[in-house]
Image: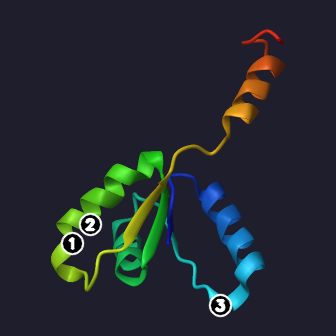
Amino acid sequence: GLVSISPGILRAAEVILHSMRGNELLVMTANPDTGSRLLALLRAASHVLCDRPSLPLVEQSLRQNRSQLMRLPQVHCAQSYLGTATIDLLRKEIGLQSAA
């Protein structure tokens, strides 16, 4: 399952995963603000990948609904959408950092 505050990231990740794995992998997505969809995802998923802003909401939902879950999914938190090299390049482009 994929959880993100960004619907664009969710859609892009879903398309990428489907293009790589096709029907052999069931991908569910949820925005952390949609409690019922998030709970359905937590019930069905064995692994949940979320962004940093979504992690507290995912963990809270797991704690609150623990009795309703047959098993707890493994939660993996993505640290950043952009790598440090990309962030450094963007800083240079907008003039926040001088070129070395």
Residue 57 numbered mark, or none: none
Q: Is residue 82 left or right of residue 38?
A: right
Residue 11 drawn at (x, y percent): 66, 65
Q: What amino acid type is highlighted by mark number 1?
A: Asn
| Mark 1 residue crowding within 10 angstroms, few (<14) / some (14–19) / many (20+) | some
Using the numbered discs, state the Cα–Cα distance from disc 3 to disc 1 in whole angstroms. 28 Å
Where is residue 7, by image quadrant? bottom right
Using the numbered discs, state the Cα–Cα distance from disc 2 to disc 3 in whole angstroms. 26 Å
Residue 94 drawn at (x, y percent): 79, 18
Q: Secondary structure at mark 1?
A: loop
Q: Is residue 66 left or right of residue 16?
A: left
Q: Is residue 72 left or right of residue 90?
A: left
Residue 71 drawn at (x, y percent): 28, 81
First along the sequence among labels 3 and 1 = 3
Q: Residue at x 45, y 68 (%)?
A: 48
Q: Residue at x 42, y 79 (%)?
A: 46
Q: Looking at the image, is mark 2 or mark 3 nearer the viewer?
A: 3
Q: Quadrant of the C terminus?
A: top right
Where is residue 82, by image quadrant? top right
Residue 62 numbered mark, or none: 2
Q: Looking at the image, is mark 3 or mark 1 nearer the viewer?
A: 3
Q: Residue at x 34, y 66 (%)?
A: 35
> Which residue is disc 3 drawn over?
24
In front of the other: 1 or 74? 74
Q: Is residue 89 above or below residue 53?
A: above
Q: Are marks 2 and 1 in contact (CB under 8 Å)?
A: yes
Residue 32 drawn at (x, y percent): 41, 59
Residue, far left: 67
| Mark 2 residue crowding within 10 angstroms, few (<14) / some (14–19) / many (20+) | many
Q: Secondary structure at mark 2?
A: helix
> Which residue is disc 1 drawn over?
65
